[in-house]
Amino acid sequence: MKKLYLVKKDQQKGVVTLFTSVILIVALTLFTFLTAKTVLQETKMAANNVRAAQAISEAGAAMDYAITYFNHGGLDHDNNGSVDVIGLASAPGNSTIIFNNNDGICTSASNMKSALITVTGTSDDGTASRSISQCVGTINIFSDDGPQQSLIARGGVGLTGNFKIVNRVNNTTVWSGNSVAIGNSNSAATYIWDHTQIRPDPTDPANRSIFEDITGTPPSNTDIISTKGLGVGVDIVDQDLNLSGLSGDELFEGFFPGGDGGSPTGREKMQTLAKGAGQLIAATDIGELDGKDGIMWVDGDVNNNVAMSGGEYGSIDHPVALIINGNLNVAGNPVIYGVLYVTGQLNAAGTVKVIGSTIVEGTNNTSFLAGEDPVVGSGGVDLTYSPFTQHLSPNGITGTATVISGSWRDW
């Protein structure tokens, strides 16, 4: 016989509360798990963003470094004929830098004046990376092929000391707007290539030493043309009215042209490039340029400055465009590889050696003695023309680097 149990109504009051509590606990647990997962995902996303930002920042820094490196000596700083390799120790942060001067996009010829730069930046934990690339080249600062003579003067040339002026590439040593005086020294002479010999290709770097040698009297592989006894020879073009009739600005832009439409002017352009290279200085600070190369702009008269008197500016592989915006009065023996441009007077009391070209504007004639020529000096002046210091220089001139518009890639 079954027994019947009666449940009183009051005994079922906690069931709903218990059920509700269980539901709330389950919901709270699910919410907690969901929140934790969301926070974890957000943390991962934030960390990924930080690492991606790190990689992009490292790549950007590496690209800036690479362009600056290229701007200060091109792709071959050690002059070994090969593109430099920037190791991990030299590259900024966690990044790699690769120069390619024969990529078929930026350049199709292996040279040291243009390249494709590819950099890769990596986050500090190595999980994120970003690669970017950019084409770079160099600005040709010279009009056409640049100066072709060893000495160019808008006014006259009145050197009275010992001098050697050599041009083995062309047959013109001096180009002057007024008369050229050979002087009183029996040692003063001009020289061109020895006509009995076959002249080698001056654009071949292997022949560089042949054309740039100024040692010896006479220098090797030369014919003597103009002397005190022989007079002014066919290698000297003087009293050129077209040259003397130019204004200072016209002469300057004949060698260093300005921008399209004349803006910026040639002088403004060269000042900007020199400033970008950190080499726009006052005359009193010219010693800071000793041992450097590239575009240099010096404001003011350089008068027997000790640093300039014994300094060396540029090198055969890394020439200069040294612009003295004033007079240059030298009592020592500086050596300049490249183009020396003097807006005022060049007074050589010492031995000035220029392997390249010397241009004297003579515009600031109020700051030197009346009646004096723009080029004077009782000392020794050794000038030899070299095309390697012009547009044929193996490396880009410091300060002339430029990025190619539209070549940026970050994908």
Image (cartoon, rainbow, N blue to C red):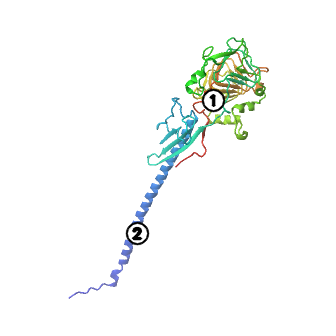
- Along the line of sight, which residue is nearer the eye, 340 or 90? 340
Can residue 379 be seen here?
no
State the residue lying farthest toward the left: 1
Mark 1 lies on a secondary structure that is loop
Mark closer to the chain start, 2 or 1: 2
- Along the line of sight, which residue is nearer the eye, 353 or 41? 353
Q: Which residue is mark 2?
A: 27
Q: Which residue is mark 1?
A: 390
- Along the line of sight, which residue is nearer the eye, 72 or 126? 72
Is 114 situated above or below 368? below
- Compute the Cα span from label 2 to label 1: 81 Å
Do labels 2 and 1 touch, CB within 8 Å?
no
Pair 2/1: label in front: 1
Is 403 situated above or below 161? below
Is 47 situated above or below 75? below
Q: Position of residue 119 (x, y in %)?
A: 51, 42
Q: Position of residue 132 (x, y in %)?
A: 52, 45
Q: Position of residue 30 (x, y in %)?
A: 40, 66
52 to the left or right of 277: left
Give the residue at x 49% y 50%: 52
Q: Amino acid at mark 2?
A: Ala
79 to the left or right of 261: left
Q: Amino acid at mark 1?
A: Gln
